[in-house]
Image: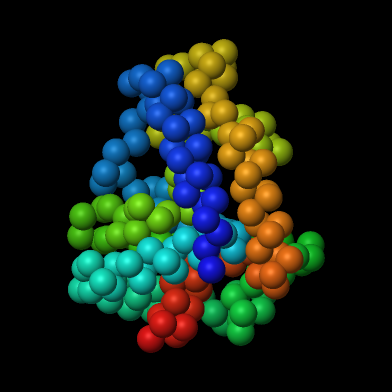
C-alpha cells in the first residue's frame, strides 16, 4: 500500500521543481513531446513502483483504453529485457552487488519507457511518475557533481547553472523515510518501470 505521506513528498518535489523552473527561465526547454529522457532504463525504488501501480489502477477506472496500452507496452518491454535483467527476474529486484551494478550500466539503454505514448510523446502516467522523472531537467546534485539535461542550459555559465539548482533536501529526507518504512514491511530493493507496471497487471488482472 502506498504510504499516505507520498502525496506530501510529491507536493514537495513539484514545488521545488517550479522554483527551479522559475530561476532557470529560457534555459530549461523541457516540454511535452521532448522524450530523450524517456529512452533508456533507470532504477526506481519501491515507493515509485507502488505509485506507478496505483496510477495504472486509477487509469483502469478513468481511461481503461489508455491503461490497457500502458499495460501491454509494459509487458512487451519486460519480455524484451527479462533475459538480461541484472537481478531477480521473479521479483524484478535489481542486484545490489558490483557485478549487477556494472551490468545495469549497459542494460537496455535504448529501451523506451512503457509509460511513454509513442504517438504523442507524453507520459501516460504523468501524475504518478517516479521521482527521478519529476526532477529531470534542472540542475540536480549527485555523486558525479551537478548534472543537467544535455538539451538545456546552453549558453549558461557554471555559476548560472548552479544558481538554478533544484533544492531536494526536504524531499530526499522524506523519501528516505518512506522507503525505509516500506523496507521494514518487506518491500525492499530497486526495480524498473516496466516490471512495476507489468507486475501491476499480474496483481490486479
Specify whether residue 106 is in view: no
Picture colour scheme: rainbow
Q: Is residue 121 left or right of residue 147?
A: left
Choose top left, top right, bottom left or bottom right for residue 137.
top left
Choose top left, top right, bottom left or bottom right for residue 153.
top left
Specify whether residue 82 is in view: yes
Q: Is residue 93 left or right of residue 149?
A: right
- Identified at 28% across, 73% down, the residue is 60
Q: Position of residue 190 (x, y in %)?
A: 64, 64
Q: Is residue 9 left or right of residue 55?
A: right
- Identified at 26% across, 46% down, the residue is 33
Query: Is 144 located above or below residue 84 in the figure?
Result: above
Query: Is 52 located above or below residue 202 in the figure?
Result: above
Choose top left, top right, bottom left or bottom right for residue 111.
bottom left
- Identified at 57% across, 19% down, the residue is 162
Q: Position of residue 4 (x, y in %)?
A: 52, 56
- Identified at 35% across, 75% down, the residue is 71
Query: Is 195 located above or below residue 13 in the figure?
Result: below
Q: Quarter holding the C terminus? A: bottom left
Number of marks in the rendered image: 0
Q: Position of residue 24 (x, y in %)?
A: 41, 21
Q: Position of residue 141 (x, y in %)?
A: 63, 32
Q: Is residue 152 left or right of residue 123?
A: right
Query: Is 12 located above or below residue 79 in the figure?
Result: above
Amino acid at each position: 500500500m502506498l504510504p499516505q505521506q507520498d502525496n506530501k513528498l510529491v507536493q514537495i518535489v513539484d514545488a521545488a521543481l517550479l522554483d527551479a523552473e522559475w530561476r532557470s527561465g529560457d534555459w530549461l526547454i523541457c516540454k511535452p513531446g521532448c522524450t530523450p529522457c524517456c529512452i533508456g532504463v533507470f532504477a526506481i525504488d519501491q515507493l515509485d513502483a507502488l505509485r506507478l501501480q496505483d496510477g495504472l489502477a486509477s487509469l483502469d477506472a478513468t481511461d481503461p483504453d489508455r491503461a490497457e496500452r500502458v499495460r501491454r507496452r509494459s509487458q512487451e518491454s519486460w519480455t524484451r529485457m527479462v533475459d538480461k535483467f541484472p537481478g531477480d527476474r521473479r521479483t524484478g529486484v535489481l542486484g545490489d552487488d558490483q557485478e549487477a551494478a556494472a551490468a545495469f550500466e549497459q542494460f537496455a539503454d535504448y529501451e523506451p519507457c512503457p509509460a511513454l505514448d509513442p504517438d504523442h510523446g507524453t507520459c501516460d502516467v504523468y501524475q504518478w511518475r517516479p521521482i527521478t522523472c519529476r526532477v529531470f531537467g534542472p540542475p540536480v546534485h549527485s555523486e558525479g557533481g551537478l548534472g543537467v539535461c544535455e538539451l538545456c542550459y546552453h549558453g549558461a555559465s557554471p555559476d548560472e547553472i548552479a544558481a538554478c539548482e533544484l533544492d531536494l533536501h526536504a524531499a530526499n529526507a522524506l523519501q528516505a523515510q518512506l522507503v525505509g518504512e516500506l523496507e521494514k514491511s518487506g518491500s525492499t530493493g530497486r526495480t524498473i518501470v516496466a516490471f512495476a507496471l507489468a507486475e501491476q497487471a499480474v496483481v490486479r488482472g
